[in-house]
Amino acid sequence: MAFTSFAAGANNPNQFAQSALPGSLDLQSNPNPEVVTCRLNPSSTYTTGIPGAVPLKLVDLGGSDTDGVPIVDVADALTDQTFGVSVLSTKVGLTLPGDTVQVAANGAIVRMVSTAAINRGLQVITNATVGGKVQTIVGKTGKVLGLTLDKATAADQVIRIKILCDGTTLRSVSS
């Protein structure tokens, strides 16, 4: 899987006039059981780090990987079984290989970036070749990432997505 940039946006999480940032949680209950602490694969090829709103998959590191926090790496939702998406870290910025990462899993609501205009209530997938942005499933085959709660009127708008992947159930779709 090759892509050059994630949809991190140009916003600084330390600014006063805060706008919606990709990877930020919304409408969450407290405590939110759908956010899981994981560790980014120490052998990940994403050595420059990952921001929020990046699709992640569970990985197995072999014999020494028997307990502790789950290990995740960047997923291509067109081919990989997605566990969830990375949550924006205002403390760290980018998550580097071996670092802990909060993962918004099944049921969490996360802000993500659209690839085009998308209506409210549609199932979406992500595609790493377009920077982890969400797109409708029309004319595509992939694993459903979630459901749009907001309407995007154009590309590169931040909208809320209810995550519908649970890391165990494949939901391949095509239309």
Image (cartoon, grey):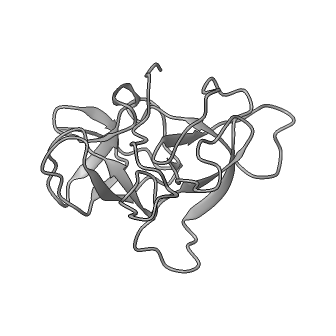
Q: Which residue is farthest top?
A: 2
Compared with 139, 16 (above or below) is: below
Number of numbered discs overlaid on the protein picture: 0
Location of residue 122 in the rendering, given as x and y in whole percent from the top left corner: 20, 54
At which x and y percent is residue 74? 54, 34
Is 154 positioned to the left or the right of 108 in the image? left
Is residue 69 or residue 54 the one in the foreground?
54
Q: Position of residue 22 (x, y in %)?
A: 41, 51
As drawn, 121 above or below 55: below
Image position of 137 with respect to 12: above or below = above
Name the residue: 47% across, 42% down. Answer: 55
Residue at 52% of width from left, 58% of height from top?
A: 14
Is 120 positioned to the left or the right of 163 in the image? Answer: left
**170 and 67: which one is in front?**
67
Q: Where, quadrant-wise, is the C terminus in this rendering?
A: top left
Answer left or right for 69 relative to 146: right
- Which residue is situated farthest in the right direction here? 64
> Which image quadrant for residue 103?
bottom right
Camera-nearest residue between 42 and 170 = 42
Indicate the position of residue 107 as horizontal and vertical percent values.
44, 65
The residue at 26%/44% (across/down) is 114
Give 102 or 147, whichever is nearer the viewer: 102
What is the residue that sits farthest to the front in this orientation?
16
